[in-house]
Amino acid sequence: MNEVLQAIEKRSSTRGYTEEKLTKEELDSLILAGLQAPTAANKQEIHFTVVDGGSPILGELEELKNKLRDIKNSPQNFYYGAPTVIFLSADESYYWSSLDAGIAVENIALAAEGMGLGSLIIGCVKDALSGEKKAYFADALQFPAGYRYEIAIAVGHRAVTKEPHEFDRDRQVTYL
């Protein structure tokens, strides 16, 4: 079977990571995979902010996310202790930015799988990054002017494994 199809078949969300940091080569390969994603009209408006898993800004985001969702004593943070979290932001005035960011984040997830790494695509901090502290977090995460959070991905070496999700082809697919 084709290596890309194998990566798609085997990939699942990783919710537990070792403390081992990504190498510069691993990180560069993941970012390159995101940069190589197609964008509508080849606008290439996606910006990637790479954050170390120990950064205090992640704790601030976790705290606000929990407050907004009325979560008390969450057993795990939103990035499950991954050593790296990549935030994708994009031009907030461009209609296709959210779609383009989704394509880029999937490229990163598949590249991570192909490299033997785990990943978790993250949307749960959207409220925290678009609410009253939007400007604060945009500045802290160094989003370009006029850009907003679209999606994020945690990446690292797996400490846990999980089977890929089940699906129901008959219910989910229609052929005309």
Image (cartoon, helix red, strand yellow):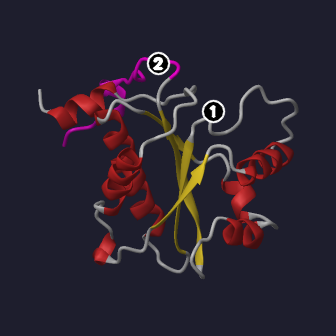
Q: Which mark is residue 80?
A: 1
Location of residue 173 (image quadrant):
top left
Residue located beneath label 2 in the image: 162
The residue lying toward the viewer, choosing from 107 and 23, is 23
- Name the element at disc 1: loop
Examine the rendered structure and indicate whether residue 62 appears above or below residue 146.
above
For the residue marked with disc 2, what is the amino acid? Answer: Lys
Residue at horizontal 27 percent and vertical 37 percent from the top:
174
For the residue marked with disc 1, what is the amino acid? Answer: Tyr
Q: Tell me: 5 left or right of 115.
A: left
The CA distance from mark 1 to mark 2 is 14 Å
Location of residue 96 (image quadrant):
bottom left
Examine the rendered structure and indicate whether residue 117 appears above or below residue 134.
above
Q: Is residue 121 magenta?
A: no
Residue 116: image location, x then y, percent: 34, 30
Q: Is residue 169 magenta?
A: yes
Magenta highlight range: 159-176
Examine the rendered structure and indicate whether residue 124 appears above or below residue 16.
below
Examine the rendered structure and indicate whether residue 144 appears above or below residue 26.
below
Residue 75: image location, x then y, percent: 77, 25
The residue lying toward the viewer, choosing from 55 and 111, is 55
Residue at horizontal 53 percent and vertical 80 percent from the top:
93
How many neighbours does mark 2 have within 10 angstroms: few (below 14), some (14-19), or many (20 or more)? few
First-in-chain label (1 vs 2): 1
